[in-house]
Image (spheres, rainbow, N blue to C red):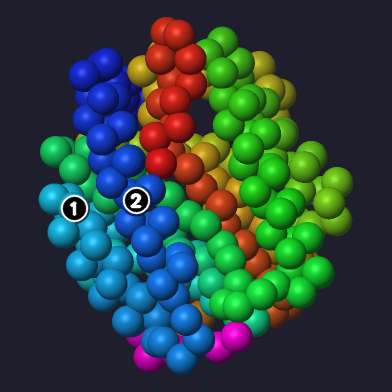
Amino acid sequence: MIKLKRPEEIRIMQSGGKILRGVVEQLVPWVRGGMTTKQVDDEATRLIRAAGADLSFAQVKGYHWATCLPVNEQIVHTIPGSRVLKDQDVLTIDIGCYYRGFHTDYATTFTIGPANPRVRRFLEAGRTALGRAIKAAARGSYLGEVSRTIEQTINHAGYAVVEELTGHGIGRELHEEPYIPGKPIGPLTKTDKICAGMALAIEVIYAEGGAAIAYEPDGWSIATADSSLSACFEKTIAVTDKNTIVLT
């Protein structure tokens, strides 16, 4: 069941989203080659708690970290650890914030050091797709229109949407209904209609090569089956009677 948010709950999520966005804005320029992904997670934990919030992802059963930190071919859910980042690595910071009873979720992908033109083009496609998807998430539209926007933008750029992984509703729980695929499933008009009170984590999850996935031995991390680059761009939004608000 879709859990609609009251205006006062959206305002709390807006405050939590501002905290989370501020954490990422500090974290991304701080990351350097030679750091381990565990060091990045430790700093993320410190920043979230220093801002008066708590860790969303650590509330997932069996997960104990502030972030997921996929590198290069890794797509999502990668546990921070001893992996040492190096120049030209493509790093995703996927991070959540829990504030006054509500979650917000955010992800961005970037390179360690300057990106070469091929990688820069790859990452720009994801940013563009997310921006267009958020514009499509207007009150009265169908969620299928968001999915179609993501798929069309990513495919037009020459890349592949990772179909098994989706965006989702968010609020008192980190993952709520509805789920938002990166490509349409069935007729658009059979998907949920977007209405005031929805809070959504819209995710663009895609690969430079094929869309097939492979699980890594730890049981959490998912990578591209062909070892091609992957990226994830995500923002939490809320739909009101007047407009769509980007919370993170």
Q: Residue at 74%, 64% (x, y): give it.
A: 120
Vertical placement of residue 157 versus 153, above or below: below
Disc assigned to residue 179: none
**Marks 2 and 1, how far apart at CA:** 9 Å
Residue 122: give x, y in percent of width and height.
75, 61
In the rendered structure, are the residues bearing label 2 and label 1 in contact, judged by CB atoms less than 8 Å apart? yes
Say which mark, if any, is on residue 22.
Answer: 2
Q: Quadrant location of residue 164? A: bottom right
Q: Residue at x 16, y 59 (%)?
A: 49
**Please, what is the dominant secondary structure of the magenta stretch?**
loop
Q: Amino acid at mark 1?
A: Ala
> Which quadrant of the figure contains the N terminus?
top left
Position of 230 relative to 215 (above/below): above
Q: Which residues are magenta?
A: 81-87
Residue 52 percent coordinates (x, y):
13, 50
- Tell me which numbered mark, 2 or 1, is placed earlier along the sequence: 2
Left of 102 or right of it: where is 89?
right
- In the image, 197 versus 62, the foreground residue is 197
Q: Residue at x 38, y 91 (%)?
A: 82
Give amino acid for label 2: Gly
- Asked whether 129 falls inside the magenta stretch, the response is no
Question: For this view, does 139 lie left or right of residue 96?
Answer: right
Where is mark 1, residue-wise? 51
Quarter occupied by residue 43: bottom left
Q: Does the stretch in magenta take in 85?
A: yes
Query: For numbered disc 2, what is the local secondary structure?
Result: helix
